């Protein structure tokens, strides 16, 4: 009897299991099965694509090796204090951090930078006469072989850590800073001498005189003399602070702003869960059909920074400020000729360096003039640059009021658009969403977020000058 009952219940259980299995196969179980299969093949394809493009996800690890030493934390901290101190700004109202703000990856809070004669605020409510371009993020610049929107500061070896072929700057510096150990040390010589950025128009004299005055000020602060002496123990006792030392400290701080461990890096190193399925599909689009990688390159000299560090015309609307202390290009003084300013060659007109895309999610505005105020719009522009540029309305683009006036001419720009973007890129709404998800989340190192970087704002600076006022989140 017991045996029969057992038999029946077993039979019942078997039918139940079969029925359940049938249910599962026809509904969720089946779908889940294919999704898992799909994701496995998605992972295989993405891993292959990353490999093919030479993307290792390990560029951050190369920093110490290429420097030949670890980052010097004490020197970086001195650089940080200088970054936030207006003492080297001869106009007394600006310093690196006024434009390269920790609230935005050490990039701009604005569409177009505001330098001297500002209102003391760093954030959306910063006001004052505009310079010419948006401030790029200083994070990860240790790996950039060419600096600036028109690459006017460059390491001729193609490697910012290698000065053997020289570091080239426009006149008057030319090749004279090539003895410095890294392109960023050389670059630090420039901002304090820029009249509209920090120096102002009142101080007479050339770049050397401006630097001498900045040093005179630094040497007058015992706290700075002590800090420099600690970081440069080999200098002769009592010797004054030099501009080489200033540059080394600033560059060291920039080295410490290396945030190149994003989900895409962890994924490339084997963590298949670092990206969501949407982001993986977005990545495949980025490296394939959407053509992004053709300019936002990761191979070779790009150091996995998502830029070929070459200039292209991509038809960005020519936003022009109402009040500027720079001189814009063109007959209407409302244009930016980009790389032509460096090469003097009209073929290079309207060309700008491909933006490196790491940590792009923390930027409030996009492109060399902040013409777009959302990442979606910046990416969408690429899909059909002609339609985007011709349909652009500065008063509806989310720009600050003083930038929302008439734009410069667009047809001469569109006549030169890079062949890679001359045909529209066809994406479905879903593909577009996946592509943006990848660019926004897949490239963001969590250490680059405003919450993290705000911690680097010093409560006070060695000169005892008032600190800049960063707007709260
Ligand atoms: C007035 C705002 C302003 C100040 C102050 C300023 N910068 Fe910049 N910075 C910019 C702008 C704008 C650019 C891009 C200019 C261009 O391409 O023409 C830039 C570019 C750079 C770049 C190149 C980034 C890249 O992506 O190639 C570095 C590095 C840099 N600045 C470092 C500094 C340092 C160091 C200081 C302080 C010593 C400083 N900046 C002060 C606005 C500023
Ligand atoms: C023909 C080369 C080229 C291609 C292809 C290209 N870009 Fe760009 N991209 C650029 C250049 C050049 C800029 C900077 C233009 C400027 O500011 O004038 C830029 C800017 C951007 C920006 C704004 C970055 C910033 O710092 O403000 C984003 C985001 C971007 N590209 C994403 C993409 C995506 C996503 C794709 C693929 C759909 C793509 N790009 C395809 C050349 C290209």
Image: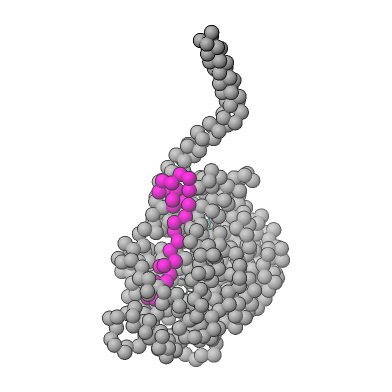
Which percent across, then down, holds residue 43? 47, 41
Q: Is residue 431 shown above or below 244?
A: above
| Front one among 51 and 427 | 51
| Front one among 460 and 169 | 460
Q: Is any atom of residue 17 visible in this view? A: yes
The quadrant where ligand 2 appears is bottom right
> Which residue appears at 33% of the width and 83% of the height?
229
> Which residue appears at 57% of the width and 63% of the height?
363
| Front one among 87 and 115 | 87
Q: Is residue 119 shown above or below 304?
A: below
Residue range of the region highlighted in magenta in the rendering? 248-274
- In the shown orientation, is residue 362 left or right of residue 242? right
Which percent across, then down, holds residue 324? 62, 78
Q: Is residue 449 shown above or below 287?
A: below
Which percent across, then down, holds residue 146? 43, 66
Which percent across, then down, holds residue 104? 55, 66
Q: Is any atom of residue 190 visible in this view? A: no
């Amino acid at each position: 009897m017991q045996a029969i009952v057992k038999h029946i219940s077993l039979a019942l259980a078997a039918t139940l299991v079969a029925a359940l299995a049938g249910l599962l196969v026809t509904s969720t179980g089946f779908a889940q099965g294919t999704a898992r299969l799909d994701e496995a093949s998605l992972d295989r394809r993405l891993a292959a694509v990353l490999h093919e493009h030479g993307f290792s996800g390990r560029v951050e690890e190369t920093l110490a090796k290429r420097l030949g030493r670890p980052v010097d934390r004490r020197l970086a901290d001195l650089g940080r204090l200088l970054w936030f101190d207006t003492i080297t700004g001869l106009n007394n109202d600006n310093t690196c951090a006024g434009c390269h703000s920790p609230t935005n990856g050490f990039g701009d809070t604005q569409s177009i930078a505001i330098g001297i004669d500002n209102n003391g605020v760093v954030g959306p409510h910063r006001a004052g006469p505009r310079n010419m371009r948006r401030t790029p993020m200083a994070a990860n610049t240790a790996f950039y072989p060419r600096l600036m929107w028109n690459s006017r500061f460059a390491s001729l070896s193609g490697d910012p850590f290698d000065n053997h072929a020289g570091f080239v700057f426009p006149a008057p510096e030319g090749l004279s800073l090539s003895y410095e150990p890294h392109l960023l040390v050389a670059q630090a010589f420039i901002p304090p001498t820029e009249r509209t950025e920090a120096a102002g128009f009142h101080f007479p004299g050339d770049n050397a005189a401006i630097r001498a005055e900045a040093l005179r000020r630094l040497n007058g602060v015992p706290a700075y003399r002590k800090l420099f002496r600690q970081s440069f123990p080999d200098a002769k006792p009592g010797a004054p602070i030099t501009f080489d030392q200033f540059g080394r400290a600033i560059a060291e701080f920039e080295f410490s702003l290396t945030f190149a461990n994003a989900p895409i890096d962890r994924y490339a190193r084997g963590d298949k869960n670092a990206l969501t399925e949407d982001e993986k599909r977005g990545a495949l689009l980025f490296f394939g059909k959407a053509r992004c990688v053709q300019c936002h390159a990761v191979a070779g000299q790009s150091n996995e920074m998502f830029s070929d560090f070459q200039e292209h015309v991509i038809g960005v609307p020519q936003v022009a400020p109402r009040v500027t202390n720079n001189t814009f290009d063109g007959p209407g003084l409302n244009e930016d000729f980009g790389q032509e300013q460096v090469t003097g060659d009209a073929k290079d007109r309207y060309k700008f360096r491909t933006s490196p895309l790491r940590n792009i999610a923390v930027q409030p505005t996009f492109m060399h003039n902040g013409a777009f105020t959302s990442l979606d719009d910046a990416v969408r522009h690429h899909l059909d640059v002609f339609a985007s540029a011709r349909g652009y309305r500065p008063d509806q683009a989310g720009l600050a009021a003083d930038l929302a006036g008439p734009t410069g001419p667009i047809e001469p720009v569109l006549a030169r658009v890079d062949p890679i973007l001359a045909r529209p890129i066809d994406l479905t709404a879903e593909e577009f969403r996946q592509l943006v998800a990848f660019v926004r989340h897949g490239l963001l190192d969590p250490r680059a977020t405003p919450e993290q970087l705000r911690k680097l704002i010093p409560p006070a600076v060695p000169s005892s000058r008032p600190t800049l006022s960063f707007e709260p989140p």
